Image: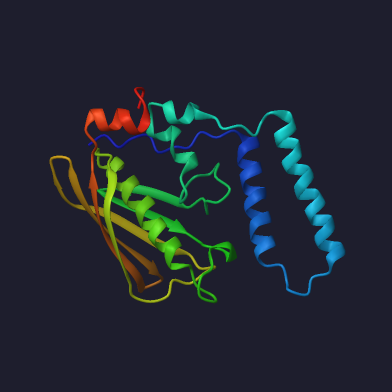
Amino acid sequence: MDVPDLEQRVGAGRLRLAASTRALIEAATLVAADADDATLDRASEAVEAAAATLVDSGAAVLDPRHRDARTYASFLPHSMLVGRAHPLSPAAEYSFADGVLDVRVRFGAAYEGPPGYVHGGVVALAFDELFGMCNVCNGQGGLTGRLTVRYRRPTPLQRELRLTAWQDHHEGRRMRVRGTIHAGEVLTAEAEGLFVTPRPETRTEYFGSRA
């Protein structure tokens, strides 16, 4: 099986901007309730100035070019799980071998649900991204038809987690994928997803003629 190109080719400037924005989001999430207004005002002015720099320079525009790209590597930088150019992504590390996708990730404070643990919705999002990527690596991309998550234990923040996914069944346009999340040796969540490869006319309707 030919595994698609999984290297993310992102310029140094975009990598730095995404990384600094992640750091800002993490710091802003952790701001103490009694932080003084003068400090927060200075930080706000700096953030507002940075946003204005991007808008005024014309750099902050809705760029549809990545949607027209013909290689999977062009989409990966925008992933909500592994995307190195996406400031809301934890920029997880990943590898694919023998039909199994292995992802290592650490979720910070911005992803908190219950105190000290990852939000359940973020866990579901992680599985959805994980499964979609697993399908592409196995040579069959598709859209999510159903996603079932079983939360076994709370998934901890600030710890390296191991996410694994593999195709359990594939027939025609339908794929069933299974996966797990472990914190060390502890299983915190497992999931099963049904994915469907859209027909050409449906793909054109949803994503345009160049998709």
Residue farthest front in this picture = 205
Image coords of residue 120 (percent x, y):
43, 67
- To which quarter of the image does residue 155 belong? bottom left
Residue sitting at x 41%, y 50%: 94
Against 38, residue 92 (above or below) is: above
- In the visual, does 91 lie left or right of 40? left
- In the visual, does 29 lie left or right of 107? right
Image coords of residue 180 (percent x, y):
32, 63
Work out whether residue 156 or residue 203 is closer to the camera in this orientation and state it: 203
Residue sitting at x 64%, y 57%: 25
Quadrant assignment for the C terminus: top left
Quadrant assignment for the N terminus: top left
Against 113, residue 12 (above or below) is: above
- To which quarter of the image does residue 168 belong? bottom left
Against 182, residue 47 (above or below) is: above
Image coords of residue 204 (percent x, y):
31, 28
Marker count (numbered): 0
Residue farthest left in this picture = 171
Work out whether residue 127 or residue 15 is closer to the camera in this orientation and state it: 127
Image coords of residue 115 (percent x, y):
54, 77
